[in-house]
Image (tube, grey):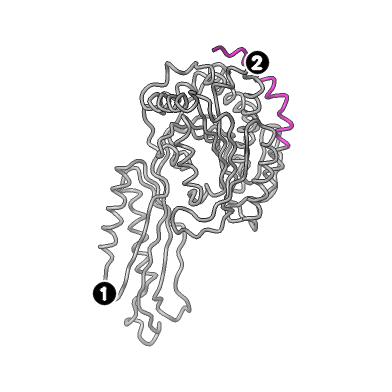
């Protein structure tokens, strides 16, 4: 099969829709969808469902009750799922999330056009801009692909509401989507220079709790056991791991404890964030945490800790390399050079790769300062990323990457293609 549309045709079509896409982005950014703002996420998901309804296939909002574990987190337990041509021999997952880190009471609520190339707003880059790019790419693909190309490529959209807290509810849906697709595109925020992410650190959370013995700070101070002081010992030791272990980040995010100033505190607790470069670093970190726990034991205190990773490290390998080479070819058609780097940030790409899906996971807006009140999107990427993704989908549907996609990717592709053939043969 042959792609009959030129790069300039795609660029022209993307440019013609730019103003409409920009207005849609502003509208979505003005909807507060902080992870724990249930009403806001519900509104955001429903506005997305209305806009995606114009696409072929079938879309729906799927609500679900409880996560796979007993995590009790106040979120909108739902996602948007849209499937088109599930019988096609090649299936692509397009993934994203609508939740942001800015809750309903956060002062950062509105969107501001700083100049012709920069738009500031909560979630504008991470990742409402990415969802606009996802939508534009599918609409452009469906416009430019002829009947033969469309018949060869099916796609699935999966948009969740809990990515910023580790996808505690949507994880089973991500796993099932990974099983029924050949490759994935996640529209996380891209880096300012347009590089794609190769490896991501694994991400987790933990807490340490110390119980001491209260006493009057004046009369019998020395009879007490100050839990805050003991907890500080713990925190200093785990912070030192940032300098003694390779590929490890440990960040203490909060501490609390104590009460009246004239009472020796008998309780204190700290919460921390963990990041690991790979499974070797993961093993070394948890061994070090266990060792530190043993070192701080002292009569009169009870010291407890718990930690776990909710996303394993995305380490990348031959499947990524083959997929990235395909994306480089698509970029060259658009006159772009595409490079990659590693990052400490985690995403649903970690989970999808762990579930066996070859994936590129930051094809969204280029931008800066995500998770801060200065979050800024680089507006030219609204068009350039749409052109890139559209070109990739057209080339994939035409079979232009078949010779590139070797190793684990090709094995999965062949297995799923055979399954599709078996299912559709009379």
In the depicted view, which residue is nearer to us: 166 or 55?
Answer: 55
Q: Where is residue 56 in the image (x, y as percent from the top left)?
A: 65, 30
Q: Nearer the viewer, residue 422 or 306?
A: 422
Q: Is residue 16 magenta?
A: yes
Front disc: 2 or 1: 2
Q: What stretch is highlighted in magenta?
A: 1-23
Q: Which of 75 and 115 is in front in this view?
A: 75
Task: Sort mark 2 into few (<14), some (14-19) or many (20+) by Cα contacts within 10 Å.
Answer: few
Name of the residue lying farthest toward the bottom: 219
Q: x and y percent of residue 292 in the render? A: 28, 59
Query: Which x, y percent locates residue 176?
Result: 47, 40
Describe the element under mark 2 as helix, strand or loop.
Answer: helix
Give the quarter of the image for residue 290.
bottom left
Residue at 58%, 14% (x, y): give it.
Answer: 3
Query: CA separation, marks 2 and 1?
Result: 74 Å
| Mark drawn on residue 84 | none
- Indicate the secondary structure of the residue bearing disc 1: loop
Taking 348 as reference, is 150 above or below it?
above
The reply to whether the magenta stretch includes residue 143 is no
Residue placed at 66% from the left, 41% from the top? 49
* Residue 32, image x, y percentages: 66, 50
Left or right, 154 with reference to 308: right
Q: Residue 8 carries which label?
A: 2
Q: Name the residue under label 1.
A: 299
Q: Main secondary structure of the magenta part?
A: helix
**Picture quarter containing residue 134?**
top right
Quarter assignment of residue 412? top left
């Amino acid at each position: 099969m042959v792609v009959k549309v030129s790069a300039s045709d795609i660029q022209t079509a993307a440019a013609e829709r730019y103003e409409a896409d920009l207005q849609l982005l502003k509208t979505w950014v003005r909807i507060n969808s902080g992870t724990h703002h249930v009403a806001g996420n519900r509104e955001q998901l429903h506005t997305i469902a209305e806009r995606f309804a114009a696409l072929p296939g079938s879309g729906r909002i799927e609500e679900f009750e409880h996560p796979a574990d007993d995590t009790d987190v106040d979120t909108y337990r739902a996602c948007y799922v849209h499937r088109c041509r599930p019988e096609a021999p090649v299936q692509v997952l397009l993934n994203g999330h609508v939740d942001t880190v800015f809750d309903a009471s956060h002062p950062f609520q509105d969107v501001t056009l700083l100049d012709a190339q920069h738009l500031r707003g909560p979630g504008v880059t991470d990742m409402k801009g990415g969802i606009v790019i996802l939508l534009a790419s599918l609409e452009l693909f469906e416009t430019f692909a002829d009947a033969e190309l469309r018949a060869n490529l099916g796609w699935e959209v999966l948009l969740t509401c809990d990515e910023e807290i580790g996808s505690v509810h949507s994880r089973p849906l991500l796993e099932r989507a990974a099983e029924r697709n050949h490759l994935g595109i996640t529209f996380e925020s891209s880096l300012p220079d347009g590089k794609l992410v190769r490896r991501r650190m694994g991400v987790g959370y933990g807490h340490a709790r110390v119980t001491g013995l209260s006493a009057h700070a004046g009369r019998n101070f020395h009879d007490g056991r100050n839990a805050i002081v003991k907890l500080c010992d713990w925190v200093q030791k785990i912070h030192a791991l940032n300098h003694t272990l390779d590929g490890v980040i440990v960040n203490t995010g909060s501490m609390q404890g104590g009460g009246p100033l004239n009472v020796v505190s008998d309780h204190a607790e700290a919460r921390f964030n963990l990041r690991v470069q790979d499974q070797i670093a993961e093993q070394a970190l948890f061994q070090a945490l266990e060792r530190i726990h043993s070192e701080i034991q002292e009569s009169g205190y009870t010291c407890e800790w718990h930690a776990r990773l909710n996303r394993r490290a995305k380490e990348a390998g031959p499947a990524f390399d083959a997929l990235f080479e395909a994306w480089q070819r698509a970029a060259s058609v658009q006159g772009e050079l595409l490079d990659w780097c590693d990052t400490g940030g985690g995403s649903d790409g970690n989970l999808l790769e762990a579930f066996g899906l070859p994936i590129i996971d930051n094809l969204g807006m280029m931008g800066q300062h995500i998770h801060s009140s200065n979050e800024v999107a680089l507006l030219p990427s609204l068009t350039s990323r749409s052109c890139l993704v559209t070109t990739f989908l057209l080339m994939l549907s035409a079979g232009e990457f078949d010779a590139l996609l070797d190793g684990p990717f090709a094995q999965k592709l062949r297995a799923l293609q055979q399954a599709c053939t078996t299912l559709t043969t009379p």
